[in-house]
Amino acid sequence: MSSSAARSINQIITSRRSTEGGGFVVRRPFPTPAVDHIDPFLLLDEMGPADYAPGKAVGAPSHPHRGFETVTYLLDGAMEHEDTTGTRALIRAGGVQWMTAGSGVVHSELPTEDMMKQGGRMHGFQLWVNLPAAKKMAPPRYQGYEADELAAVPLAHGGLLKVVAGVVHGAVGPVETTSPMTYAHAVLEHGDVVEWKPDTGHTALVHVFDGTVTVNDQIVGEGDMVVFDRTEGVVRVLAHEKKAQVLLLGGQPLGEPVSRYGPFVMNSRQEIVQAVDDYQSGRLVQ
Ligand code: MN
C-alpha cells in the first residue's frame, strides 16, 4: 500500500438508468442540468446492460460529430462501426474504439447482423472527450483495439485491471490520446484494491457501475460517480464486500470555453453555427 495522502473528494454524482430515444437504456452521470461537463470530459453514458430479443437490438444510425472524440468501450455485445474516413470496424466485447472526430465525421454504430438476428446482451460505455481548440479542426482519426490488446494487470484476489489509455499500476494503455488522459476499467473481486495516482492538477473520476466499493475510505454505491478535487493525492478503490466494477477516468483540463449543440462541441456559438451550416450543406466531411 502506498503511504501517499488520499486525494480529496469534491462531489459524488448519482445517476439512474433511463431510456433514451430509439430504446437505448443508459445511465448518464453527466451532462445533467447541474453538471454540463467535467473538463476535459463532455459526456459519459453507460449503455445497458440490456438484453435484447431477436430483432430488437438498437444502435445509432448515421450521425455527425465535430470538435471532440467519441470513445466506445464494449463489455457485452457486438457493434459494427462505419464512418466517412472509410473505416469499417467490428467492436467486440472487451474492445474499444477511440474516434477523433476533429473537423468532421459522419458515422454509424449498429448491432452486428448476428446480434440483430439472435438478440443478446449489450453493455458498454460511451465517453465524449473534448479536443483543445487548436485540434478541433484536425483531420479525423480512428483507433480500435480488441480486448486482448489492452494492457491488463491481474489483481491479488482474482480481479483484473484493464488499461485503455494512460498508466495505472504501471500498465500503459495502447490508445494515443490528444491530451494527457487515463481510461481504465477495474474488475475487483472481494478484497481487491486499485491504487491510482492521477497527475496533480488533472481531473480524476471514478464511476462505480457494478456493486459497492470504498473510494478513499468512503462507501460508494452502484451508479455513483466520484469527482475528485484537482489536488495532489492517491485514489484508492477497494471492493470490500463482493465483486465490483469501476471505470477510472483522468485528464488534463483544457480550461477553454465550451459551446455545445447536440453532436458538435466547439469553443464559441459562432463555430457551432458554422458546424451546423457545414453539415447541412454537405461540407462537414472533407
Ligand atoms: Mn456518435
Image (cartoon, rainbow, N blue to C red):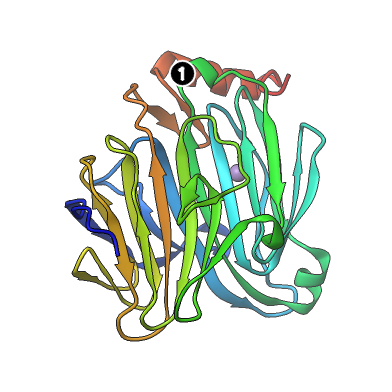
Residue depicted at 78% across the width and 63% down the height: 112
Q: Is residue 38 visible?
A: no
Q: Is residue 85 left or right of residue 47?
A: right
Q: Which residue is mark 1?
A: 133
At 20% from the left and 44% from the top, the residue drawn is: 229
Instruction: Indicate whether 13 appears above or below 178.
Output: below
Helix, strand, or loop for circle 1? helix
Residue 270: x and y in percent read: 43, 13
Q: Quadrant of residue 256?
A: top left
Where residue 266 sits, quadrant-wise, is: top left
Looking at this view, is 124 or 211 the one in front? Answer: 211
User: At x 53% / y 26%, what residue is drawn?
Assistant: 67
Query: Residue 200, can we see it?
Result: yes
Within the displayed image, which quadrant is ligand 1 positioned in?
Answer: top right
Residue 186 versus residue 280 in the image, above or below: below
Given residues 188 and 2, the one toward you in this image is: 2
119 sits to left or right of 230 = right
User: Observer-nearest residue: 128 or 233?
Assistant: 233
Q: Position of residue 37 (x, y in %)?
A: 34, 40
Splitting the image into 4 quarters, where does residue 221 fall?
bottom left
Quadrant placement of the N terminus: bottom left
Q: How many marks?
A: 1
Question: Who's the residue at 61% across and 62% down the image?
Answer: 74
Q: Is mark 1 within 8 Å of ligand 1?
A: no
Q: Mark 1 belongs to which amino acid?
A: Ala
> Residue 101: percent from the left, percent from the top?
61, 31
